[in-house]
Amino acid sequence: MSMLRLDQILMAAAVAAMIVFAMVSTSEESLNLISLILIWGLLAIGFDLIFGMAGMLSFGHAAMFGAGGYALALLAPQFGFLPSLLVAAVAGAALAFLLSVFALRVSGLFFSLLTLSLAQLVYILASTKLRAFTGGLDGIPGVLRPALFGVDFYNNRNYFYFLVVVFVIGVAIMALLRISPFGSALKAVQANDVRAEQIGYNVQRLRQCAFMISGAYAGVSGALLASLMFYVSPQMLHWSTSGDVLIMTLLGGKGTLLGPVLGVAVFEVLKEELSQFTEHWYGVLGIVFILCTIFLPNGIAGLFAVLGRGRKGASK
Amino acid sequence: MSAGNVSLQCENIQVAFGGLKAVAGVSRSFQSGRIYGLIGPNGAGKTTLMNALSGHATLAAGQVILNGRDITKLSVHARTRAGLGRSFQITKIFSGMTVLENLKLAAFAHRYRVQPFWMPAGRFAEIRQDAEKVLAQIGLERLAHAPAENLSHGDQRALEVGLALLSDPSVLLLDEPLAGVGHERLEQALELIRRIVAGRTVLLIEHNMDVVMQISDEIVVMVQGQLLGSGTPAEIRANPAVRAAYLGNDE
């Protein structure tokens, strides 16, 4: 059971190949694109902890994503980059905690709707009421990059290596969480919450912990994006961000560690390519998404699973 | 825990759905080490009483006392920790997982208040031992690695009981543990229940009169949200009030 399956190895290889490609390629565009994929990938693997493992559909991840961005933008000039990145994680977890206090009173669709509305509240606060801190709709320009070991992270290639390190740490922690007893408990909650409660799991506490960890991932991801773009704006907090990460996760395959990252990759590449041909790229992406949910219900990870099984069958 | 100690006590338990009193003041104590059969017509409030005991129904009034401790205000999982186990009328198992994985989940829930997140679940040898012990008790060793949802109905009922057993409950509430178990498996299922009760108090709801009379030390009759009476199976068969209310149309 703890043995790595072939499809998991293949997915890891695909992600590794993508990172290596960015390293050897001289193209600035592909470097930028893959940087974006790693950042959104962190958001998506965090999102899948609650969506794929615990079965909770959050429409509020934009709030934690944006909170991380703003935390870094506001704090990095005073406290330095790494401490602020840590605070961005804490901010994401803290906001997730706040949201969960209300949203976890209900479950299913109502949980989704409450997270959506609470996140929109954060969006409105950031874009209007808290203008003095957040710069309102203009956002905050000039977000810092890390200053470490005398390396110039304002060079995109150097910053990419920084992203790879954070990404690998994030994936490693998540991989452990998912196969730990904590991860098993989340699966139990998804499979049958009444039974999970009955055998002694504190189901609400488990959901809350998962939501906060997921929020921390969103916070870090948002901070890294703000730093990549040198800019943070309420657009990060907009509900469509929450929708995007849901589409990415479903496209890649929910309930798998690296599937969501592959989903992000397909999403970002399609967006990049399609937007060169038509301004209606979002619509075309929507059609792709609909076709995928019909023909690839388990996402790209499902393709890999079929591939893995095929090999196994052939070798016997 | 010698026989004769009260392990579960109900004090004037009331559960209301709107204006309807599903359980209308039940007071009764249950002694440890005995099997109680809870019988009564449909709608008598048997499952609702069980829900009140396990924490799934909100009490309008009354108290639930487990081994001398008032558990009325505890949540479902806290009651499980306090020693109250439960199986459900409608099978609730973890589908998408094997039988052994199902049991391991219950073992983790029992052993750890905070679920370990720093180590792969497969590394916990004692969890596997706990799960395998119960697996043998419920006689499903040959199905350890079968997906739980593929089990026959009777085997799923056994797994239900196994999940409850892993919390080592002092009181076990079994809601129709034999429902849908085929005739040829019935004796085996009864044997399982007899085997697991050692030292525990069992309160079970069962509609098959022969079975419930055969396995119970004491029968408790419930009608219209209230306890009508109780006694040994022989006494209950002979009780005219019970016969009129419940057994009458049977014989």
Image (cartoon, rainbow, N blue to C red):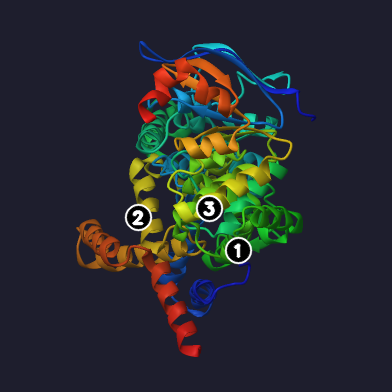
Badges 3 and 1: C-beta atoms under 8 Å apart?
no
Which label was assigned to residue A224?
A: 3
- Disc 1 and disc 2: Cα gap in Å? 23 Å
Q: Residue at horizontal 59%, vertical 63%?
A: B144
- Disc 2 and disc 3: Cα gap in Å? 21 Å
Which label was assigned to residue A168?
A: 1
Q: Where is residue A192 in the image (x, y as percent from the top left)?
A: 48, 45
- Disc 3 and disc 1: Cα gap in Å? 14 Å
Which label was assigned to residue A247?
A: 2
Q: Is mark 2 on a helix, strand or loop?
A: helix
Of the image marks 2 and 3, the number of the one nearer the N terminus: 3
Judge from the rendering whether residue B247 lies leftward or rightward of residue A214; answer left or right: left
Looking at this rendering, what residue extends furthest in the right direction? B2
Please report, as a chain letter, where disc 3 is located: A
Report if residue A247 is visible in the image.
yes
Of the image marks 1 and 2, the number of the one nearer the N terminus: 1
